[in-house]
Image (cartoon, rainbow, N blue to C red):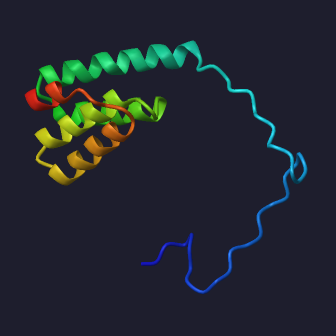
Amino acid sequence: MKSPCHQKNKPYPPPPARADGPGEPPKAEPKAAPPADAAKQAEALEEAVMKAFAAKRYEDAAAECRELIALRPLDEGARYNLACALARLGKPQQALGALMAAIERGYADADHMGED
């Protein structure tokens, strides 16, 4: 099945006009700080992940890691933990993908990887 994003031999549509005019740098949107509730939710999820691992409930750990990743997409630790959960579930290809995503986002604790 071909991707709907790119079709061979079809020209790309022209880019939309920028609101700030051609030749000017785009205006930066102010970034909103994450709400305190999101930080508390992330902290609770991190704790739940550790409890799930301790109880060897790897499906739960993987699900909670995915929720944590949805809250904090750049969190390399959550992706590393997802890789560990997937490996424990016997899903090596998915685990490798999660591990590569963790490394791409900065996870570099080789000693810890060796222990796991």
**Depth order, front residue of 95/49:** 95
User: Is 74 situated above or below 5?
Assistant: above
Within the image, what quadrant is residue 15 found in?
A: bottom right
Q: Kindly give the residue lying farthest to the right in the view shown.
A: 21
79 left or right of 94 in image? right
User: Is 17 situated above or below 31?
Assistant: below
State the image coordinates of residue 30 (x, y, percent, origin top left).
74, 27
Q: Residue at x 11, y 39 (%)?
A: 88
**Depth order, front residue of 55/90:** 90
State the image coordinates of residue 69 (x, y, percent, origin top left).
41, 34
User: Is 43 situated above or below 13?
Assistant: above
Q: Residue at x 75, y 33 (%)?
A: 29
State the image coordinates of residue 53 (x, y, percent, origin top left).
16, 25
Q: Kindly give the residue lying farthest to the front in the view shown.
A: 23
**Depth order, front residue of 69/44:** 69
97 left or right of 10 in image? left
Within the image, what quadrant is residue 61 found in?
A: top left
Q: Quadrant of the C terminus?
A: top left
Q: Quadrant of the N terminus?
A: bottom left
96 left or right of 7 in image? left
Q: How many marks?
A: 0
User: Is 21 situated above or below 12?
Assistant: above
Within the image, what quadrant is residue 111 found in?
A: top left
Q: Residue at x 53, y 15 (%)?
A: 37
Q: Residue at x 79, y 43 (%)?
A: 26
